[in-house]
Every structure is written in structure tokens, then in C-alpha cells.
């Protein structure tokens, strides 16, 4: 779908002040609706983007309840599961959002030719940087704020995730309204609201990334244990 034209006219100082107010006004365990309400009070829908991996559509649903027609950024890496693309199409069909496919500079074939086949195996950090981090950073330049679905229960690296902060790396406000949620609360919300969910979630994939770098997770394992299994890597770089 076509992208709305991001409308960012605020200075960095203004955005920092909004982030400061959010951190001050929102309790550590404020509800997702309260976080979105704060954003809707201070920002126009055209200033805001939602990042969604299409593991589920809970975050786009939560945000669009108060910020309709919001841009939902899907990082189309070229390595996604078929089920992930199916979820993306369903989100575009049923939710009041504008799905935007964010593409890397190089196709998979072009990357293979330039850096060698299957860079995700030989240098996963470089692959993530080129196919996720850089494209997202470029896409976020026109926005004043972005929403992520990061949850504190996902990994030790995420236990202190704030509900709102100023994203120093990308230069805009970052909202994490689902940070206090558990995986069960996520699924309960999706079930109750009939929100699209990736079929892989019910097949042992509590965290879904690119197909070559994601495996099912055994009972009792860390939810993100299936990401980059066997490698000294726990994050793609989007949230660090």
C-alpha cells in the first residue's frame, strides 16, 4: 500500500520534551491504551509510525484504535516465512492502517553477488544491518515518533524497556506500549479482539524473524532462544 507522507515539523528539542513528559506522566505499568492516548494528544497521526514484524497485529490494532490510518512499517527483508507475508496481507486487509513495505537497498540476489551467498550465516550482524536496521532508520527520518512491540518478558536485554523514551539513535520519540505485557496477555488480546496472528506462533515460534535465522523454541526456553540459535547474537540491532 502507498505510504502517507510523513509530516515532521517539530524540532529535536520539542520531541525530547514530549518524551520527557511521557516518562513523567506515564506510570511504569501504564496501560497500552494510556500510552497511545498520550501520543495521540501530542502528535498527529501523520507524524507517527508503527513497526511491526507481523508475528501478530496486536500493536497496530492497539495504536490504530486512537490513531487511525497510521503507517505500519513492515521490514520486508526478503527472507521472511510465507506465514509472515500472509499475516502482513491480512493486516492490510482488516485493520484501519496503512501498511508500508520497507525494502533493503539490495535484493537478496544482489547481496549474494556482492557479499557472498547466505550472508546471514557468515555475518548475521551485517545482514541484519543492511536488511533491517538501515532501511528502518531511513524510513523513520520523516516521523516524529514510532511505536514498537518490544516486551520486557522477551529477553534479559529487554527487562528495563521504558514505555516512552527519546530514541537517540534515530532522533525521534519511541513508544513501547506493550512493554509490561506477557506473551499470554498478547495472545489473549489477539483472541478477544480477533486480531490477525501469525500461524507460526501456535507452532513453537514465540519470536519470529527471518526464516533462515529462526527455529522453534522448546518448552521452558527463553522466548527468543530460537533467534540466531548457536550464534553469539540476541538482537538484530533495531532496539539497541
Image (spheres, helix red, strand yellow):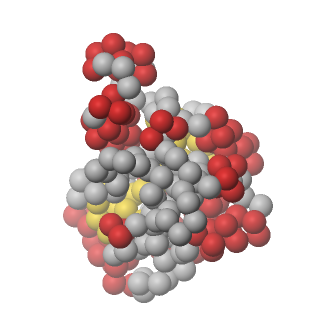
Residue 115 at x, y = what percent?
A: 28, 20
In this rendering, the count of numbered labels is: 0
Quadrant for residue 89, please give it. top right
Q: Is residue 192 visible?
A: yes
In the image: residue 31, left or right of residue 202: left
Relative depth, front residue between 212 and 57? 212
In the image: residue 130, left or right of residue 187: left
Quadrant for residue 58, please give it. bottom right
The quadrant in which the N terminus is found is: top right
In the image: residue 191, left or right of residue 22: right
Residue at 42%, 16% in the rendered image: 109
Residue 38 at x, y = what percent?
A: 47, 74
Q: Is residue 15 visible?
A: no
Relative depth, front residue between 21 and 30? 30
Relative depth, front residue between 38 and 56? 56
The quadrant in which the C terminus is found is: bottom left
Residue at 59%, 37% in the rendered image: 81
Residue at 34%, 62% in the rendered image: 173
Question: As displayed, is residue 29 above or below residue 44?
Answer: below
Residue at 61%, 41% in the rendered image: 84
Residue 187 at x, y = what percent?
A: 67, 67
Furthest residue in direction top, as rendered: 113
Amino acid at each position: 500500500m502507498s505510504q502517507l507522507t510523513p509530516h515532521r515539523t517539530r524540532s529535536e528539542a520539542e520531541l525530547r520534551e514530549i518524551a520527557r513528559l511521557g516518562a513523567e506522566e506515564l506510570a511504569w505499568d501504564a496501560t497500552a491504551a494510556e500510552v497511545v492516548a498520550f501520543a495521540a494528544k501530542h502528535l498527529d497521526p501523520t507524524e507517527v509510525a508503527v513497526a511491526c514484524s507481523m508475528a501478530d497485529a496486536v500493536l497496530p490494532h492497539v495504536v490504530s484504535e486512537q490513531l487511525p490510518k497510521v503507517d505500519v512499517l513492515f521490514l520486508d527483508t526478503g527472507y521472511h516465512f510465507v506465514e509472515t507475508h500472509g499475516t502482513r496481507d491480512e493486516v492490510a486487509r482488516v485493520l484501519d492502517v496503512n501498511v508500508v513495505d520497507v525494502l533493503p537497498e539490495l535484493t537478496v540476489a544482489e547481496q549474494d553477488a556482492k557479499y557472498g551467498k547466505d550472508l546471514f550465516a557468515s555475518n548475521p550482524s551485517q545482514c541484519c544491518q543492511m536488511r533491517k536496521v538501515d532501511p528502518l532508520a531511513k524510513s523513520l527520518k520523516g516521523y516524529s515518533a514510532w511505536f514498537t512491540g518490544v516486551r520486557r518478558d522477551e529477553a534479559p536485554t529487554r527487562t528495563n524497556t521504558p514505555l516512552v523514551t527519546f530514541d537517540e539513535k534515530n532522533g525521534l520519540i519511541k513508544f513501547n506500549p506493550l512493554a509490561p505485557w506477557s506473551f499470554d496477555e498478547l495472545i489473549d488480546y489477539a483472541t478477544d479482539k480477533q486480531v490477525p496472528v501469525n500461524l507460526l506462533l501456535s507452532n513453537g515460534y514465540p519470536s519470529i524473524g527471518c526464516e533462515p535465522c529462526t527455529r522453534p523454541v522448546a518448552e521452558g526456553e527463553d522466548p527468543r532462544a530460537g533467534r540466531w540459535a548457536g550464534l553469539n547474537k540476541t538482537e538484530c540491532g533495531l532496539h539497541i
